[in-house]
Image: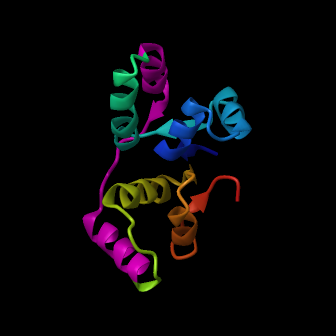
Amino acid sequence: MSVLVDSSVWIAYFRGTHSLPEMDVLIGENLIVTNDLILAELIPYLHIQKQKRLIGLMNEIERYPVQIDWPEIIQMQISCLQNGINGVGISDLIIAQHAIQNHFQLFSLDKHFASMAEQMPLTLYGT
């Protein structure tokens, strides 16, 4: 089981704003994977905060390339809109698609992923 951890979880984990003991388990068992999109959301913030050690650690996580299937992204957005799931950004659709394509569980604090998982074969971590 590999778990794609969304930037919302990483940010909460780094800030300590949520109790996330499951992150310690995932890190300890080396179950976390990432992609360049998630790193692009996180690393600039870490750079500004002068968190060189964290940047190095983030770059050590197993990284899978994102292969965007634009027709599928369009269909995912149509499905979201038809089912009243509004305001899902393209980056979150790409993250969901990446998780689905690679059979990863997705760990996110963003609520719209739970709604999306009801409409598509997206598996959420911890559910």
Which residue in the rendered view is the most extreme toward the left?
70
Is 78 rendered above or below residue 105?
A: below
Residue 6 visible in the current orientation: no
Counting from the top left corner in percent of width and height, residue 102 is at 48, 52
**Where is the C terminus found, in terms of image quarters?**
bottom right
Q: Residue at x 69, y 27 (%)?
A: 28
**Magenta-highlighted residues:** 52-81
Is 105 rendered above or below residue 88?
A: above
Residue 104 visible in the current orientation: yes
Whether the magenta-drawn stretch holds residue 55 is answered as yes
Which residue in the rendered view is the most extreme toward the front?
17
Q: Choose between 123 and 40: the one closer to the eye.
A: 40
**Where is the N terminus found, in terms of image quarters?**
top right
Is 22 rendered above or below residue 55?
A: below
The image quarter containing residue 70 is bottom left
Question: Magenta stretch mostly in which secondary structure?
Answer: helix
Q: Is residue 92 left or right of residue 32?
A: left
Q: Choose between 112 and 96: the one closer to the eye.
A: 112
Counting from the top left corner in percent of width and height, residue 12 is at 56, 39
